[in-house]
Amino acid sequence: MLYGRYEHTIDAKNRVFIPAKYKDALGNSFKITYNKLMNQCILVYSDLEWEELQKKVSKLPTLQYQYFIREICSNTVDVQLDSQGRIVLPQFLKDRAGLEKNALFLGVGNHLEIWSPEILDEKNKEVDIEELTRMMMEIGF
């Protein structure tokens, strides 16, 4: 399970360090993607998690499956860690996620999210705190 929060700077060549805590779970090669229907962030999946996701998607009705292939797979890139533990963020993904100088990595269970800190702050203002509190109390958190 991936969890935690880490912030790193994106350099002039669009390289960013992957937090050391996540490297074992991701391996040296993994997928990054963008899904405009979810949040305005880059999603990071290990190759194993990506395969599991593909299996689930292949069971969707044809039209939904086609949409997934078009929307998600067309925005997915294989990345590899360099010798210093960095990846290069493709400019089109960086632009879609609104990333500029800083990248905020969030572990969210089976994958990571890479956010612009400013955009995440704005998204968090939209959260219904009362509803979130009620849900947390229901599960005993």
Image (tube, rainbow, N blue to C red):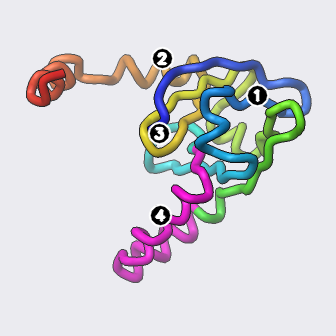
Q: Nearer the viewer, residue 110 or 91?
A: 110
Q: CA distance from mark 1 to mark 4?
A: 26 Å
Comparing 135 with 66, the one in front is: 135
The quarter of the picture where residue 101 lies is top right
Label ID, residue 121: 2
Comes first in the chain, label 4 or label 2:
4
- Tell me the amino acid under the disc marked 3: Asn
Residue, disc 1: 17
Give the residue type at disc 2: Asp
Sequence-earlier tag: 3 or 4: 3
Q: Disc 3 and disc 4: Cα gap in Å?
A: 21 Å
Label 1 is placed on what type of residue? Phe
In the rendered image, which residue does mark 4 sit on? 52
Q: Quadrant of residue 8?
A: top right
Mark 1 vs 4: CB contact within 8 A? no
Q: Secondary structure at mark 3?
A: loop
